[in-house]
Image: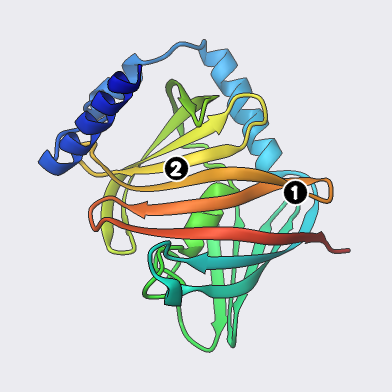
Amino acid sequence: MKLLRLTHYFLFLLAQFLGYPLYGSPEDFHKLRSLSPKKVQEFAKNVRQNLEYGNLNLRVKVKLYEPLKTDSQKSGEIFYVNSSKKQKIRAVFGDKEYKFSHHKGQVAKSSSGENFQINTPFFDDLLLTPQDILLSFSWNDSYEYFGEAKVAGRPVRQFIRHEKDSINGIQYANILAFVDVKYMIILQIDFLNDVSILVRRLSVGSFKNFDGIWMPKIVEIMDLRGRRRTKLEILSVEIEN
């Protein structure tokens, strides 16, 4: 069994090095259905309601860092407000403050200290972008069902979205979201280029109960092309009135 896992890992690295597709061609995406259209629609609706509906007001203390660089650490706070109409996020790192919101597919943004782009990292040496946060906590109805899989041993349903854009200078053509079947939260987001090769990944490494609130403890962002990593560690979570 150990040898089999090592073989799979070697083949994964080889595919990345040679530039071979890992997910098949885009026309194959629609052949992997294992749920009826009605069940897919119901599941997607529940995910959207779970992520976007209801009221939530959180103050989250975080730490950003590159694992192999001790001098890369940045500390700050993320204020997250979720209502039935809009999601608002305010990120504060030192004297820098970033505000962005999501409402009916539209993104609004503002900042103090400097201008920023939604697909550009908060810091040059770290990979987390405002778009990463929005993708993790919102749902887009243009997602299409892709199939069943497992992430960190948990059953997930995969949904694909065809969208040509760039994030942190990395060109992508599709976004693949892995949604936990039981809790209906996004555990992983993969960015695929136009020949279906994985070029960037955002994944939840672990969860923790913060005084009754289950939140990701570690989120990792990986640039597969540049072989870079950044970790977001949640230190504390408070509910604000």
Report the label total. 2
For image coordinates 24% across by 44% down, the residue present is 193
- The C terminus, quarter of image: bottom right
Figure colour scheme: rainbow
Three-letter residue code for mark 1: Ser
For image coordinates 62% across by 65% down, the residue present is 62
Looking at the rendered image, the disc whose residue lies closer to the viewer, 2 or 1, is 2
Q: Residue 129, position in %: x, y? A: 46, 64
Q: Nearer the viewer, residue 208 or 172?
A: 208
Using the image, determine if residue 100 lies above or below residue 221.
below
For image coordinates 39% across by 68% down, the residue present is 120
Contact (Cβ within 8 Å) of mark 2 with mark 1: no
In which quadrant of the rendered view does residue 75 lie? bottom right
Q: Nearer the viewer, residue 29 or 85?
A: 29
Name the side, left or right, on which 134 lies relative to 240: left
Using the image, determine if residue 191 lies above or below residue 171.
above
- The N terminus, quarter of image: top left
Name the side, left or right, on which 23 lies relative to 141: left
- Residue 189: assigned label: 2
First along the sequence among labels 2 and 1: 1
- Label 1 belongs to which residue? 84
For image coordinates 52% across by 67% down, the residue present is 64
Q: Residue 16, position in %: x, y? A: 19, 40
In which quadrant of the rendered view does residue 30 lie? top left
Identify the element where label 1 is drawn. loop
Using the image, determine if residue 210 lies above or below residue 68.
above
Q: Is residue 105 visible?
A: no
